Image (cartoon, rainbow, N blue to C red):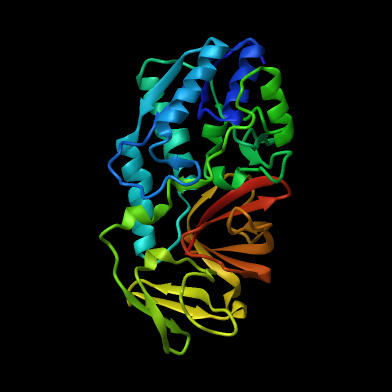
Amino acid sequence: MDKKKIVVGMSGGVDSSTVAAILVDQGHDVTGITMKIWDGSIAVKDKGKHACYGPDEAEDIEDAQKICDKLGIELKIIDLSKEYKSEVLDYFTKEYMNGRTPNPCVKCNLKMKFGLLLEKTIESGLDFDYFATGHYAKINKTESGRFQLKKATDIKKDQTYFLHALTSKQLSKVIFPLGNYEKHEVKEISKKYGLGVADRQESQNFIAGGHSCLFDGKEDPGNIIDAKGKVLGRHNGIFNYTIGQRRGMGIASEEPYYVIKIDSNKNQIIVGRQGDLYSDRMYINNPSWNTDIDLSKPINASAKIRYAHKGGDAIITKEDENYFVIFDKPQMSITPGQSVVFYIDDCVIGGGIIN
């Protein structure tokens, strides 16, 4: 690739830092950009592990600045704290209060990192040809000229699940330099450039100390019941539970109970045995597609119902404005609010929200 103007999404971590170093080494005109999303308005209870949202953001920005100084490039800090609250935090809170389990990373990537961050960067007067990030993913260009996501070489680190809603237009201006590398190789490359971040702790949580701080004052106790309606215990807010959860219910039983349903209308948690968690079908809404396939006909694809899920063979059929998915084999803990992502071979063809 000829010399280009490239902005790199910087977090201060090994992946984005290595991307910036690689692009500088290749001779591109590189500028770092980072989101400021923490405004201190939410009292986190305990920092715990490194998180995407929390008071340690200042440390992340400081680390990103050190990397940019080392590479001799500028770092632009874009304040998106107000937008992050409305687009991600408010969405997350509302979904949980409705008995659903949202995925904030999918929303953040679509609306924030690959949306508002770039819009605000352009508004700041910075012109660029491409946006690069440290995500583990590849981009495939089809014969028709469509840009699609493709799984990374390092399958354990592949992040196409979180990026699936990006459009062909967005992907045409994005590059993922780490798509062909294994994680251990990226760490070695960072050491070669002397970045000093190979062993830096990575973000493990969405919010420092856990998401319960978003629900302070919203606690609403209710019953934990079995499928027949028998009261087995009490809960202190449905936002503390998700489908498939086993721990934290305080129910004495020789055989463990699992959350099989969350009824926000009745403020109830319904529990059952492990076998009750399996289902072979689901509806999805808010679909996004990036494929040359005729969507009016049934589609055979692999459906991934959460990040750690290996994916299950399924048939996808359109029903009015929604899509109905039937798996070849029952899947455990199909969870309303979570994203499902569809793959054919290693390419993402689309996804949606489990309904």
Residue 203 visible in the displayed image: yes
List x then y, in percent, for residue 2. 65, 12
List x then y, in percent, for residue 336. 48, 64
Viewer-closest of 182 and 146: 182
212 with respect to 162 (left or right) = left
In the picture as drawn, the residue positioned furthest to the left comes out as 217
Residue drawn 60% across the image and 74% down it: 279
Q: Identify whether 52 is placed above or below 329.
A: above
24 with respect to 228 (left or right) = right
Q: Identify whether 61 is placed above or below 56.
A: above
Q: Which picture quadrant has residue 218? A: bottom left
48 with respect to 124 (left or right) = right
List x then y, in percent, for residue 193. 67, 17
Of the 4 image quadrants, the one containing the N terminus is: top right
Residue drawn 69% across the image and 29% down it: 186
Q: Identify whether 288 is placed above or below 199.
A: below
Residue 175 visible in the displayed image: no
How many labels sit on residues? 0
Viewer-closest of 165 and 106: 106
Viewer-closest of 98 and 10: 10
Q: Which picture quadrant has residue 292? A: top right
